[in-house]
Amino acid sequence: AALTVLNEVLLRHETDRFCTVGLVRLRQETDGWHVVVACGGHPLPLLRRADGSVSSAGARGTLLGVMADARTTDTELRLGPGDSLMVLTDGVSEARRDDEFFGDDRVLSVLASAPASAAASVDELLRQVLDFQDGSPRDDIAIVAVRVPD
């Protein structure tokens, strides 16, 4: 609902502004966290389970502020002990070195082998993205991660 309202506001604004949004709502439960993910044109958050497996979380949605019938989907999931969720901008996967992108597969690979802590995972991914670009990022890079303690 929040993304629908945001889309309407952007469409009424007298500019050609649009945005991508990754929205995550967390609610603590007795033995973990209930999560709702909704994305509008934004890269999907990444879910790293306690066993080290990594996958996308959520469903792709359309850019906001472009079409009246923007489409977003709420996806519910549960984070248990040792699970983490990471939200990142496209400046991570679209980091370039000449004509080569860092890419989604490389992001997943880094996260699968990174240390389990949220801070260490963010640090490792950022280090590898910056190394890939020889220390000169060409786009915005934002990475936020949360982890449920063991």
Image: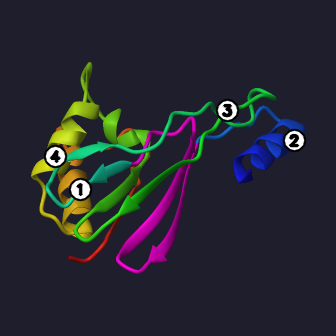
In this figure, which residue is indicated by the disc labeled 2?
13
Of the numbered discs 3 and 4, the one sitting upstream in the chain is: 3
Mark 1 is on which residue type?
A: Arg
- Amino acid type at circle 4 is Val
Query: Residue at label 3?
Result: 71
**Between marks 4 and 2, how big is the CA–CA gap?**
40 Å
Which of disc 2 and disc 3 is earlier in sequence? 2
Q: Residue furthest front?
A: 30
Tell which circle, 1 or 2, labels the residue nearer the N-terminal end. 2
Query: Which of pointers 4 and 2 lies earlier in the amino acid sequence?
Result: 2
**Residue under the point 70% across and 47% down:** 3
Please name the residue that numbered disc 1 is placed on: 49
Tell me where the magenta segment starts and ends, as one range: 21-45
Q: CA distance from mark 1 to mark 2?
A: 41 Å
Q: Is residue 17 magenta?
A: no
Residue with the most extreme top position: 99
Give the CA separation, mark 4 to mark 1.
14 Å
Q: Nearer the viewer, mark 3 or mark 2?
A: 3
Q: Secondary structure at mark 4?
A: helix
3 vs 4, front mark: 3
